[in-house]
Image (spheres, coloured by chain):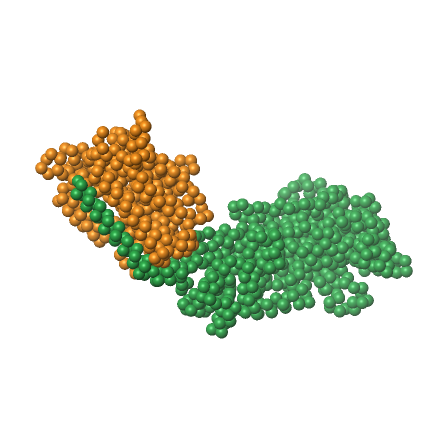
Amino acid sequence: MTTHRQKRRFLLDFDWWLLGGALILALLGVVEIYSSQPQEDFWKRQLWWLGVGLVAMFVTATVDYHRILQTAPFIYGACVFLLVLVLPFGQEVYGTKAWLGLGRFSIQPSEFAKIGTILMLAPFLAERWEEHRKTKHPYLTMREVLAALGITAVPVLLILLEPDVGTALTFFPIVGGMLFVAGLRPRLIATGVVGVAVALSLGWYFRHHVLKPYQVQRIETIVHPERADRRGYGYQTYQSMIAVGSGGLTGRGLFRGTQSRLRFLPKAYTDFIAAVVAEELGFLGMLGVLALYAFLLLRALNHAKLARDHVGTLLVTGVVSLLGFHILMNLGMIVGLVPVIGIPLPLMSYGGSALVATFIGLGLIANVRLHRYVN
Amino acid sequence: MTDRLTLMQYLLLVLFIGLGVRFWSLQVVQHEQYLRAAENNRIRLIPIPAPRGAILDRHGRVIVDNRPTLSIVLDREELRARGRKPHELVEELIAQGLALDRESVRRRLDTMATQPAYYPVVLKENATPQDVAWVRARQIEYPELDIMEQPQRRYPHGTLLAHVLGYVGEITREQLARPEFRDYRPGDLIGRAGVELVYDRWLRGRDGYRRVVVDSTGHEVGEIERVDPIPGHDIKLTIDLDLQRAAEEQLGGRRGAIVALNPQNGEILALASHPTFDPSLFAQRINTPEGRAEYRALLTDPERPLYNRAIQGIYPTGSTWKIFVAAAALEEGLITPEHSTLPCGRGLQVGNRFVRCLGSHGMPDLHRAIVVSCDGYFYRLGLRLGIDRMERWVRRFGLGQRTGIDLPDEVAGFVPSRALKAKFNPRDPRWRDFDTVIASIGQGSVAISPLQLVRAIGGIAVGGVFHTPHVFKEALGPGGTVYTADRPLIVPLQKRTVEALRSAMWGVVNEGGGTGAAARVEGLDVSGKTGTAQVVTKERAGGAAHLRDHAWFVSFAPRDDPQIAVVVLIENVGFGGRFSAPVARIIYETYKEKYVRASEVVAVVPPASERPSREGAPVVSPSPVALEAARRRSPLEVSNRR
């Protein structure tokens, strides 16, 4: 029952700063989508999805997150079901079957699976933590870590079948961040870091066996930009860097970026939207964007610290890991520090499912803050 | 837990600061360099010309197709970015040793001035390997030059069938201004004559293009968009290459025309007009000084090689006209096959003039009069028929009007009439008997094309259905089509009229004294009529070569089931029976070899009723082999005829 008092508390206590920051970024995204594809109606669709996202955020923020978590297995199960459904019935775009058609619109189940996985992992890890807190070494056991990895592995494997390697990759920072906060043994962290390093170098050594030729080329572009084939797979990275660099301190002006408007920059409205911002609004504009993202993430982690219980903390941690990884990888790709792996920029890249999923994640963060006091 | 969250916050902060530093480095420190790179990014539109459809003969053999050639093209956007003028550049390129044709380049630059700068201008087609090497070696100095592949018309048979094929050329400015050429752009090739013109929309296809990004040196750095060309439809003609080749070989260096068609459906099997021209001139050499000289020579040649004598040339028909007079007289009931004798009289006194017949034929009947081509008989028959009925009948047979052939610029010609004389002879506008007499042997104001003549004779031979002659059989491939424009004139003729005329024309070729004996082909029953058309009166001609008579032979075969009709016209050589009939024989022999199997040899014995009744002309005895073949086919038919 929503009483008058509860309404009042919601209005006072809701994290309007979080919403405001996200809204500015999302609206800037709409403007730049229009700028790069003025003749298409992508920006209108994005605006429509933004509306859906805002509603979703308010809904997820209001209902006590404990009640949401009670349905976590169902949500997780539904996400897995959709991921299975997409394999035979999905629409294929650029060789990847990631979309489910729904009348005029299509949804990307893998975006929602990220939230579903967070919802599943948070209570599991929080309960384990409760069990261990009284012991001398309050750390997760190996078996528990493997169980958490198992929960993540189900959607990851299904997404790899689409195949969408970039999206599958984004699940590891989620589980990694949550395990880290939930109490990963320091020795295990060290082992993990070393293990990943060894795996990466081994993978690189055997890159021609493990990866597809284009994947190797994309990585080599980053390692040796001067040797990159600018006509081939180095093309996107090079054009993106030109877009960013030509923006200068103050940018070439809104709607005046030649790189995006003349379509030198491929897919400017999705993965490379930040390059359009950098080109048109310059270093100062980009500084603002970076500051807003940093503000959102750091503020969310503050909420995590203040959370009523560990489930709340872990929920926020999961969402922040998810968003942080996307933002850092995407911007790294824009400036030529990270290979092109097809990870969109949260809030700004064109894509309805990702936008709605992001706002649901933000809703969870606001929820944890809203319910930080024990009644 | 809180410690670790704080740790995460610091980690994020450090990474964001790192990104900020990277943005600073790209956008502020290296800004100049990237701005230059952005300005050097250029879009180029590279057209992919659609290959024009091939033209095939009725058996699918290639008559015209395409060969790949390279062209040197100019990107005007790049040129403008470098602050240079196209005309200046062209002068410089010529001075630097690139062989360009100044005149055509200028014209192109002018016509393309109305088009967006990203459309390239072709500076030179048919670029030689040296030209290509020249451009490639100077890519740095002249980044605005490019090499483009362009399909070009190829004529494996040289000048063969040139008048039917026509030729292609660049679309003119006048055409572009007209609404029906809306979807063409300057520089596009378009059919300018013949089949290439009439069926241009089927042949041309749709060009594709690639939109690519190039850097400041003209190097392609990426493809933004690609639209593949849609090739044009291949077109199958009704022409048979072997008959066509035979026809053109027979004309050789003489002026004249030959048309062979199937009177059952109007399909043209061969259409030749000499002298001829080389269509590859227009496709390959027109933009060179030599090519232009060649074209000027064609235009000023007094023998007019570009002109298609078969459909644009109009001539008096001479005695071939007698068939129409005879058909009209039979249909009007003035004579019957049984009662048709008239005197020859070595000619006829008309008013104060005596019009001569070339021989002395006594009292021939219609059959004999046609076989020996007796003028005296037809003077008298023509007077009985009268000019008005003659005019009405020949018009029904499609004479003096366009046949509707699917080739451009067909000429209607004239048939004699009171109105025509009044119009062209104001000093003596009244129609006189003398005019009727002259008209009844195809002289005077008769002027029709060889195509009209062969269509009319073929139409009578099949019983009075005059199909629209055509060369188009079908457009191949998905969405293709077949010929559907046949609008036959139908003049139901009495069976006995058709029989009498077929038999008489058979006699012309196969009976003693027949004027067309030189066209006889063993076992095919060629039937025809010779004609010798006076250019001027005998007295005025005086033997001058260009005033000699035109030689006609119009014919069909086989007699009882006509499958092919052939007209041969040779200008200024003399008697039709002597010059044109032998040419027709070669064509029939080629036809027979190809289309008639031994078992299909038909109609060897002339029906008794059609025999000359009084003149006692020698009967040609059928060869035993042919007779045997006919018997095997239908013993009943043979015995009935006897």
Colour assignment, chain B? green
Colour assignment, chain A? orange
Residue A42, given in percent of the width and then of the height, sits at: 42, 44
User: Which quadrant does the C terminus of chain A fall into?
Assistant: top left
Q: Is residue B435 left or right of residue B22?
A: right
What's the residue at 81%, 60% (across, down)? B358
Residue lying furthest left: A136
What's the residue at 42%, 54% (across, down)? A256
Image height check: is B591 above or below A177? below
Q: Quadrant of residue B176?
A: bottom right
Q: Is residue B340 left or right of residue B192?
A: right
Nearer to us in this view, B330 or B42? B42
Q: Is residue A250 left or right of residue B77?
A: left
Nearer to us in this view, B275 or A100? A100
Nearer to us in this view, A283 or B440? A283
Residue lying furthest top: A1
Residue A6, given in percent of the width and then of the height, sits at: 30, 29
Image height check: is A97 above or below B156? above
User: Which quadrant does the N terminus of chain A fall into?
Assistant: top left
